[in-house]
Amino acid sequence: MELRGKPTAAGRATQAAPTAPPLEPSSPPREPPPPTSHGRFLRRLSRTLLAALVTAAVVVPVSAAARPRIPAPAPAALAPPTTATLDKAYTANRANAAEASRMAAAHGDRTRAAADRAMAAPSRHFLTFDGRGQGLAVEVLGGLAHADRVAVLVPGSDTTLETYGRFRAGAAALQDRLNSLDHRHGTHRTHGPTSRPHTAVITWLGYETPGTVSTTVLTTGRAENAAPRLKGFIRELRGVVGEKAHVSLLCHSYGTVVCGRAARGLDVDDLALIGSPGTGADSAAALRASARIWAARGADDWIVNVPHVHADLFGTTVGFGADPVSPAFGAHVFAAGTGGHSDYFKPGSVSLDNLARIVLGDTSEVTRA
């Protein structure tokens, strides 16, 4: 007979503990679904906007401290222009620009003083000049009093009195191209086959443009403020050139957002969207414009990388929606060549030729993309 001692507490515990079944290998963790393009855009946009907000919070106050607001006179008080009062308006605005130049020089801002002084030259014709803040300017190139083909250019971001020269250079290139085209272009509507159209080009820096690196360039706020001003200007323009004149609105970059906001009921014949991030509308029809809608984008324009979506972010709608050159948008898409974002009015370019043909009403010769 085998003798057994009493089991110890440890032994009892060992005997009482059942043998645990072997563990089955766990299932591999599920990978999260890949983010959608919309989700990626929102995250990227959130990071960009946050960085911009931080920049605005830090850089803007420093910049403001480094460069106080430039003094300038109030704009000349003028009635809406007519053909009889154009020269009076031009003279008054040149005098205002000259005074703004003197005040800027006295303030120590040589860059603004030089820009204002250039605008005060006897050859310049401004319907509006305001040297305060970023500055506003509406200039006429050509003979507006007798014009029957008028182009109004609306600029995009970073256009101020200091950078106005670049904007004006594009307008001058367009006016030169209009003058050089064959006299038969666009004449059949009003004048008959042998008469030459009278053209004018207007630079409409009639709103405070956003900075390219800023939160304002991502939203429609500046455009919503600008749209009533643009509508009012077109009404005044019709008072000068009459209802029979062919008026084209050529809008660039963020300026296309302005034109999209102003398009409904706007009394223009053609509306061209070039280098557009979107207009805030899903289609050309949604603009509810009576004008013929055109769109173009150069092959090297970086704007192609802007996502064409709307997104609600921090209580604000960010982004401008559908791509105006997409077939679904429904615009007349024309060729813009190989140029970049700032090349649409470059002399000799495909885009400049097509814009000139649109202005002249010679749409049958516009080359399509």
Image (tube, rainbow, N blue to C red):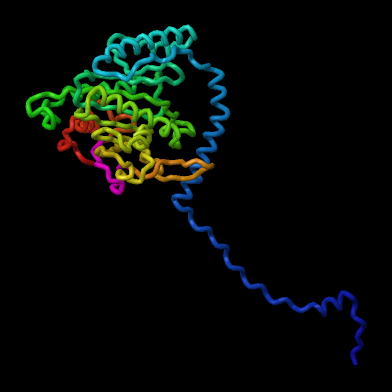
* The image quarter in which residue 121 lies: top left
Measured as percent of width and height from the top left, residue 5 is found at 92, 83
Quarter of the image that includes the C terminus: top left
Where 297 sits versus 326, above or below? above
**Residue 284 part of the magenta segment:** no
Residue visible at 49% across and 34% down in the picture: 215
Measured as percent of width and height from the top left, residue 134 is found at 44, 21
Q: Give the range drawn in magenta.
A: 324-336
**Residue 331 part of the magenta segment:** yes
Quarter of the image that includes the N terminus: bottom right
In this figure, what is the number of numbered marks?
0
Can I make out residue 170 in this image? no
Can I make out residue 261 in this image? yes
Left or right of residue 182, residue 121 in this image: right
- Name the residue furthest bottom: 1
* The image quarter in which residue 173 lies: top left
- Name the residue furthest left: 194
Left or right of residue 133, residue 10 in this image: right
Measured as percent of width and height from the top left, residue 223 is found at 41, 33
Judge by depth and name the residue closer to the eye, 299 or 318.
318
Measured as percent of width and height from the top left, residue 345 is found at 27, 28
Magenta part mainly helix, strand or loop? Answer: loop
Judge by depth and name the residue closer to the eye, 117 or 100.
100
* The image quarter in which residue 267 lies: top left
Where 258 sits versus 142, above or below? below
